[in-house]
Amino acid sequence: MTVFSMRDFANHEQVVFCSDERAGLKAIIAVHNSNLGPALGGCRMWPYASEEEAVRDVLRLSRGMTYKSAMANLKLGGGKSVIIGNPRTQKTPELLAAFARALERLNGRYIAAEDSGTSVADMKFMAQYTAHVAGLSDKPTEDGMRSGDPSPATAYGTFIGIRAAVKEALQRDSLEGLRVAIQGVGNVGFDLARQLHEAGASLWVTDIHQDALERARSELGATVVAPDEIFGLDVDVFAPCALGAALNDQTIPQLKARIVAGAANNQLAEARHGVELMRRGILYAPDYVINAGGIIDIYHERIGFDRAALIRHIEGIQDNLLEIFARARKEERPTGEVADAIAEERFGK
């Protein structure tokens, strides 16, 4: 495997392979671009089928963070990290400490936060060994306080983004009666489902974890379907909220939804799939634009948290999306291409 020649390398500034045999650590840290500031992005722990799959994932995620921060007008660069392993069975204090020491050696070029397979508690533990973790501070909410977990902010931004996409594609402001298929009801997906349910939407959900499905069924009245059934449902919105590459040659032909808008990163398996969605008349909300609430949350924690300012910043996701939709319509270009062009103008590619 040659990293430099990989299609997803995309001019990364730095890719670091980290290992600690005693702790069982195998990890990769990728810094894509630091023009606007230090690279900030989540640390994912996942049982990748191969090292090549892990490298490809971290490169795609890291690049996405550069574009996400630029589109959200943050003074941050883009980076990401992955730990190879099953977070339910292989995550140990020794492994987290070893990864934190690897972070510290980068001296702040990359700052980690929670992601799939890691938690705020993990970040707080790692903070004993490195200063370069974020998303730790408790924050005020309408109901009291919540932890540093940025998931609620990600879910809220995605909800705002779905509202913008519905306005663009369906010419309606209300979500009452909207039919939404959600792929993945973990922390972000479930909170998004809750907000949609409260807005009057009907929900269909799938997930690899049965307990998450039972919660969505019992608390939100969602209809549970098998993972391979979620794509072909007769719904208005398909919301990918699990891992990436959900939109590919096999799944796009199944879609009946008019809108694809969800919280997952790297939803398009390849850039050409954005062209295919446009060809089929499906409005795509670029993933790194609609799911930017989490990084916005962490950024505000770093600059001095003000809840009202955070909410205003997250709600700006709607304006970003409406600008992208309008330009894509006028220029007859895929929304992802338009979003990339705007982001590149901002981070100075």
Image (cartoon, rainbow, N blue to C red):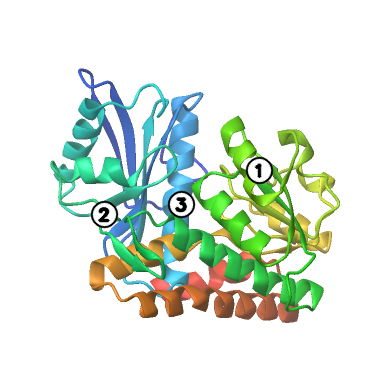
Question: In which quadrant will I find the N terminus?
Answer: top left
In the drawing, does residue 138 fall left or right of residue 295?
left
User: Which of the labelled discs sits on residue 218, or is there none?
Assistant: 1
In space, the residues marked 1 and 3 are separated at their CA atoms by 44 Å
Secondary structure beneath dot 2 equals loop
Q: Looking at the image, can residue 131 be seen? A: yes
**Callout 1: 10 Å neighbours few (<14), some, many (20+)?**
few
Is 195 positioned to the left or the right of 294 in the image?
A: right
Identify the amino acid type marked 3. Ala
Q: Is residue 317 above or below residue 91?
A: below
Which of these two is toward me, 89 or 322?
89
Position above or below: 67 against 29: below
Q: What is the spatial separation of the Cα atoms under label 1 and label 2, in whole angstroms?
A: 31 Å
Residue 60 place in picture, x, y as percent: 48, 47
Q: Which residue is mark 2?
A: 136
Label whose residue precedes the other's in the sequence (2 or 3):
3
Task: Determine contact: label 2, label 3, CB under 8 Å.
Answer: no
Mark 2 is on which residue type?
A: Leu
- Helix, strand, or loop for circle 3? loop
Foreground tag (2 vs 3) = 2
Inter-mark Cα distance, 2 to 3: 31 Å
- The C terminus is located in which quarter? bottom left
Q: Amino acid at mark 1?
A: Ser
Mark 3 sits on what residue?
A: 10
- Considering depth in this image, is 87 or 204 the residue closer to the camera? 204
Residue 32 percent coordinates (x, y)? 37, 54
61 shown above or below 82: below
Count neighbours of disc 3 (C-alpha within 10 A) and say few if under 14, some if 14 to 19, many if 20 or more: some
Residue placed furthest toward the top = 22
Residue 25 image point, x, y percent: 28, 26
Left or right: residue 1 compared with residue 320: left
Residue that appears at 47% across and 71% down: 71
